[in-house]
Image (cartoon, coloured by chain):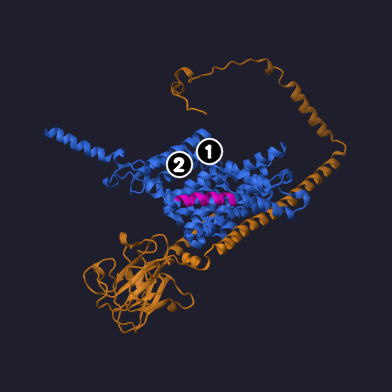
Chain colours: A orange, B blue
Amino acid sequence: MNRKAVILLFGCLLLCGASVFAQGRRAICINEVMVQNDSNYIDDYGRYQAWIELFNSAYAPIEISSMYLTNDKNNPKMYPVPRMDVNTEIPGRQHVVFWADNEPNKGTFHINFKLEPGKDNWIGLYDADGKTLIDEVLVPASLGANQSYARKQDGVKNEDNDAEAWEVRDGSDEKYITPESNNIIIDSNEKIEMFVEHDRYGIGMTVISMLIVFVCLLILSLAFRAIGKFNAKLAQRKREEATGALASAAEVDRDPDSGEEIAAVCMALHEHLNMHDHEDLVLTINKVKRAYSPWNSKIYSLRELPHK
Amino acid sequence: MELINFLGQNLADFWSFTGFANATPGHIVMLCVGLFFIWLAIKHDFEPLLLVPIGFGILVGNIPFKIDAGLEVGIYEEGSVLNILYNGVSAGWYPPLIFLGIGAMTDFSALIANPKLMLIGAAAQFGIFGAYIVALAIGFAPDQAAAIAIIGGADGPTAIFLSSKLAPNLMGAIAVSAYSYMALVPVIQPPIMKLLTTKKERLIRMKPARAVSQNEKIMFPIIGLLLTCFVVPSALPLLGMLFFGNLLRESGVTTRLAKTASNALNDIIVMLLGLTVGASTQASEFLTWSTLGIFFLGFMAFVIASASGVLFVKIFNLMLPKSKKINPLIGNAGVSAVPMSARISNNIGLQYDPNNYLLMHAMGPNVAGVIGSAVAAGALLGFLG
């Protein structure tokens, strides 16, 4: 393999590694926040504290240790999520709640800052380098007691204006608060409901799916038709080049043979006819060692597999 | 006396654990079904590589035992050996591995040489959607209907893959139905082919396929993957492995891997897949009215698929010049029962013209059917998954 290929391979591997890393951590997002928790959700010490819920929007588990939670843009490394805790690996499509009680000694999920009721609270989630902002949210000052600020759908962001992806929830039947659980409880498959409603006889599905199958195979067919034609042209050109080369070689052959060539041919013929006259008469007997004998073979003592 | 009582009590306990004490009529029926499958495979050579493991799996899955004893032997009991092996089916990773083997075994030359034959493979997928329409009419929900309809693709691994995602409770019946009808392809297809074609059409001779260069064979899996999976990413597990296996075969530098994928690995997965699918057909799950419906729909799907492939060729011929006409007998090969349906095309063709060998022409739509059914499964999974 030449040097260029090795460099190219390394480049590709680095690129793949970088993208895998980025894809993984970027799937973590801030999903729901409660600033003033008077009587909502109790922590593991039996107290009501403000909380921040993170959600893993990927379908694979993601380790969040060494990421940073902060409420200060100037100090992105405010709370590093501790390492060596098995609970910091969030399973796919699962949640984890951090208690904003400014008491980090109580455990991994108790962070070293508090959220302030009646004020705008900015919360940021940074990657392990402390520079890459993974997600952020500005919780409005108007958020009341026992109200949460939550994404309308778990992990779904609005790239143009992320504030539109959030809503205030007051704990009512329509706007329920869901720490460590999905913000929307899905009890049916929307896609199937849609097909039941709009495509009762399956005609739509049949038309669309057959179209997809045909398009896929038609594209493949056209691609290989083109490749086949290109290949045929290439082969034709090679044939023509070869024929051209032969023609020019034939022209060269028409030139009178040089003396050197004639001498070389004569020497080759002489060697071929005269050099090996003695060896043909020599007989050689080599001892052949055969360790194997059918008499000691196990295979003959076993029953053969039956054949039909 | 106490000793006799003690022994009697233990014997009674032991009896309550035996299959005799726990057998139900359902178990007996399923054991007979398993024996019937094994008989079909050994006596009549119907897909023996699949029907022997499935038939024996049915026996394994229907040995009666005391369910509440916590023996951890049943396929649905968490942590049992069979349950661990069944994970490959329920989590859907056996079918892609089978596709890896199929890719490593399949020579796509016939398809590359005559790419328009791919469209026959697409047309035959109408069997899937025809059965989907009938399944909806019978009263199945869309996801269940799709899982059942995929039987029409005549592709066991694809049927298992899709049903494990869309209707896991029906998967046993769907898999058994798919493999049963694949075994019965030589019985189902010929009458349909003869019914839909004239004698003149059956005598059509096709031009021999051109030679395909090694470069084209190498490019096929790469371009095939990119083009199909960009359109239907949900088919990636199946198509990705199919094309990967084919690249191993055609690249010429990974012969060892191709051999393993097409021989040892494929055989291991076929054994485990067949056995666990068979074992998953426990009487309580299998002996239902749904199963009857699934078998009926599976048959419908096969008939529609075979007929639509043949009819498509006849329509396609109307647009082709006389010298490039396609023999409609290769239309049935659009279903992906490789290479059985291609062999049927060849045999029927030889019945009418002893010198008209259609096998290589039929292999084109046959392998296109493998791709087509995987794409159809991907589309259904994308819409309903």
Range shown magenta: B291-304
| Secondary element at tag 1 | loop
Could you tell whether B87 is left or right of B110 in the image?
left
Looking at the image, the residue that sits furthest to the left is B1
Could you tell whether A80 is left or right of B90 in the image?
left
- The image position of residue B311, as x and y in percent, is 66, 52
Q: Is residue B346 visible?
A: yes
Locate the N terminus of chain B by quadrant.
top left
- The image position of residue A35, as x and y in percent, is 31, 78
Quadrant in the rendering for residue A172: bottom left
Q: Which mark is residue B46?
A: 1
Q: Is residue A84 visible?
A: no
Q: Earlier in the sequence, mark 1 or mark 2?
A: 1
Q: Which residue does the image show at 83% across and 44% down from the upper left?
A: A248
Identify the residue position indicated by label 2 in the image. B54
Looking at the image, residue B56 lies above or below residue A57:
above
Q: Main secondary structure of the magenta part?
A: helix
Q: Which residue does the image show at 52% across and 65% down from the upper left?
A: A200
Mark pair 1, 2: CA separation? 12 Å
Q: Which residue does the image show at 47% across and 46% down from the upper left?
A: B176
Q: Which mark is residue A40?
A: none
Q: Amino acid at mark 1?
A: Phe
Is B298 in the magenta? yes
